[in-house]
Image: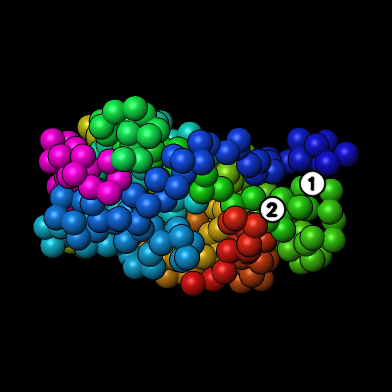
Amino acid sequence: MAGSASEREPIEVLKVPRPGDPRKLVLGEALFNDPILSGKRQLACSTCHDLASGGTVHIARTIGYMGREHRYNAPTVFNVADNYRLGWRGNFTSLQDQTDSILMDPNLMASDWPTLLTKMSRSRFEPVFEAIYGHEPTREDILDIMATYLRSLVTPNSRFDRYLSGDKTALSASEVKGYEVFKTFGCASCHQGSNVGGNLVQKFGLFNIPPSNPDPNYDGDLGRFTITHREEDKGVFRVPSLRNVALTAPYFHDGRAKTLEEAVRTMAECQVGENIDPSDVTLIVGFLKTLTGEFKGKPLDAP
């Protein structure tokens, strides 16, 4: 019964993966919160991806090592392993590859492998790597540790998951109606699957082109074009997951929308060409709030 209810819907129940090696998870959590991974020991992964704050930080774009704003808003790391496409431009399909790129980016973690490996071999983490892998830490080991930890950042058992699993009391009548409105407007054509997104790329502005950033030096609005240099990829981005979306403001690649209501109105205008009624905005937002899950058995709280 529970399985059949989920199968008829575009959104699927979020499943918890098999736990990884507990030694790797402990080490991964420690490294995630330690600035050793950054070139100047100034930043940790958790600096921009705060697990106590929806897996992100609540500013439009964070500031990098060189004093420049990052190109994109920091996406949540929760359920990141359930995304087929990673990064705002969808340019990675491997957590190891994405982590490698972030560590080496001069305006992100600003590290380099020779220096990082030397630091790690002289750190308190070296004996732990030795115990797990049987040798001093290597590039592959560090990326494996981080990917293993990232895969564990899953937030199952949202109220909507419980609804899909057969508990029809998990949602109110207005929240169920909000889900129906969400589907009626076609939102589920891109925001579907177990992560309610994250598995395809789409143009931002199918019906109406959204305003571009007024800074002439900002190229983030170009999306995948900055990778592929193909004209058709201008403004194309990875469709983000909507899980825990009520906790991850501001929204979009550049953090332009401060509230979920504003984000819903923008999506209706730009993606489906609708000037959406305020009552429908309220209903959709009510539904989206049911996508907030649990981490380590406890409900995620609003930051």
Question: Which of the two residues, 81 or 220, is positioned nearer the viewer here?
Answer: 81
Residue at horizontal 76 percent and vertical 35 percent from the top: 7
Q: Is residue 120 magenta?
A: yes
Task: Classify mark 1: helix, strand or loop.
Answer: loop
Question: Which of the two residues, 51 or 196, is positioned nearer the viewer here?
Answer: 51
**Crowd class of label 1 (few under 14; some 14 to 19; many from 20; radius 10 Å):** some
Q: Is residue 269 above or below residue 197?
A: below
Number of numbered tags placed on the structure image: 2
Q: Which residues are magenta?
A: 104-126
Question: Which of the two residues, 282 or 89, is positioned nearer the viewer here?
Answer: 89
Give the percent coordinates (x, y) of residue 241. 52, 48
Question: Which of the two residues, 37 or 286, is positioned nearer the viewer here?
Answer: 37
Q: Amino acid at mark 1?
A: Ser
| Residue 50 visible in this rendered orientation of the protein | yes
Q: Return the residue found at the far right.
A: 1
Identify the disc placed on residue 165. 1
Picture quarter containing residue 197? top right
Residue at horizontal 55 percent and vertical 53 percent from the top: 242
Task: Classify mark 2: helix, strand or loop.
Answer: loop
Identify the disc placed on residue 157. 2
| Residue 210 visible in this rendered orientation of the protein | no
